Amino acid sequence: ARGERSRSRSRSRGDGDDDDEEEESEEGESEEEEGPSAAGGDGRSLKLRRTRRWLRETSQRVTDATRVSLSSLVSHDKPSVRAAVASAASSIAHRCRATLPGLTRPLLEATLTLAGDPWLDVSSVARDGLNALTSSGQIDHDTLRDVIKDGFAELPRAVRRAGGGGGGGGG
């Protein structure tokens, strides 16, 4: 009866996550955190249930959003933005490797790209980040070599895309 009441409350809130309760019992405890009062001032507060499912889904959303943002930020006009991206990319790769495993490679690609930036204020931050990742054992030289090798392999396609996909041959 308690489970049914909980499910009907979930439906009335409109979150549609009926299997969170079942997953919670299968995968361990969840944490609840109260947020700010719900808009409308009716006294209710928002609660966040951190289940493994929530972590998995949130991790994927963060990964997707970061991947989309990285390319434009790495090539941003302002060196201060690129330096901040270099710092953030190496920091996230270092601190969030277990929670955001899908970001390791894109973050390394961004940091390697910025390590070659013509502005010393940008490239030095990126190089320091790479050094910290390798010296801590988070990233090994083979991984870096693979990222660089794959980047070179991608160059012809990138050039074709940038040049309108022409078939080559002048004249």
Image (spheres, rainbow, N blue to C red):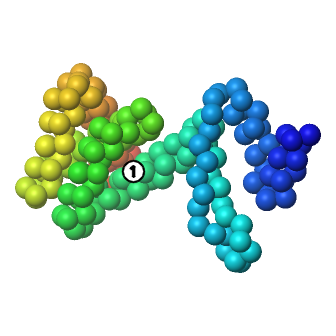
Comparing 153 with 27, the one in front is 27
Q: Is residue 171 above or below residue 39?
A: above
Furthest toward the bottom, the residue is 40
Name the side, left or right, on which 53 lies relative to 86: right
Q: Is residue 156 visible?
A: no
Comparing 37 with 100, the one in front is 37
**Quadrant location of the N terminus?**
top right
Q: Is residue 94 above or below residue 67?
A: above
Q: Which residue is mark 1?
A: 161
Q: Tell me residue 168's x, y (percent).
A: 33, 46
Q: Quadrant of residue 96?
A: top left
Furthest toward the top, the residue is 142
Name the side, left or right, on which 125 lies relative to 148: left
Q: Residue at x 60, y 57 (%)?
A: 34
Comparing 165 with 94, the one in front is 94
Q: Tell me residue 134's x, y (percent).
A: 19, 30
Q: Tell me residue 164's x, y (percent).
A: 39, 55
Q: Is residue 138 visible?
A: yes
Q: Quadrant of residue 95?
A: top left
Q: Residue at x 48, y 53 (%)?
A: 65
Q: Residue at x 61, y 48 (%)?
A: 32
Amino acid bearing label 1: Arg
